[in-house]
Amino acid sequence: MIQIRENGGKQEVFDVARKKWVPLTEEEKVRQFLIHYLIEEKKTPLSHLSVEKQITVDGMTKRYDLVVYHSSGSPMLVIECKAPHIVLSQNVVEQVGRYNKTLRAPVIGVSNGQNSIFFHIDFETEKIQYIDGWPDLSH
């Protein structure tokens, strides 16, 4: 269940993954929806989620939105969250692709809360394949 509160005239949401209250921006609404969807509908253990962590990409410090890890500890899905008014363009997909150069998850995705797009990455053949619907996270 998503918890929202007022703090100093601003809305905040409790992020169960980061275990803290964060400002409820339009992008954060999408991120929180996805976190709760993964936990409640996809039965992803909370311990397998990582939210807004810094990584180094091509020598630059970046911050990914959401990573789902295998029980083995390797990344299996990287999702870039955008506010609902942001179109899921080629640039948005390329952004998550750049993050994945470091993370090397087999699945990447982008979501604006209204639409979500996922791709499977084969690192050996360097082929990228569109996934119709939500990826299977059971393995």
Image (spheres, helix red, strand yellow):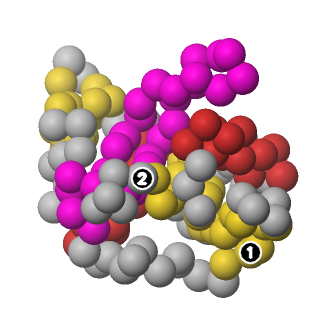
Residue drawn at x 32%, y 76% is 42
> Tag 2: residue type?
Ser
Disc number placed over residue 74 in the picture, else none: 2
Q: Say which residue appears at 58% left-offset and 23% top-offset.
A: 56
Q: In the image, 97: left or right of 36? A: right
Q: Is residue 133 magenta?
A: no
Residue 45 covered by magenta stretch:
yes
Mark 1 crowdedness (10 Å alpha carbons): few <14, some 14-19, many ≥20: few
Residue 38 falls left or right of residue 60:
left
Q: Quadrant of the N terminus?
A: bottom left
Seen in the picture, residue 10 relative to 107 is either above or below; the reply is above
Categorize mark 2 by other alpha carbons within 10 Å: few (<14), some (14-19), many (20+).
Answer: some
Q: Position of residue 73 (x, y in %)?
A: 34, 52
In the displayed structure, 100 sits above or below 36; it is above
Asked if 34 appears above or below 3 in the picture, the reply is below
Q: Nearer the viewer, residue 132 or 82?
A: 132
- The tag on residue 130 is 1
Ranked by sequence position, the earlier of labels 2 and 1 is: 2
Image location (x, y in percent) of residue 10: 28, 26
For residue 69, what is the image quadrant?
bottom left
Residue 8, given in percent of the width and then of the height, sits at 20, 18
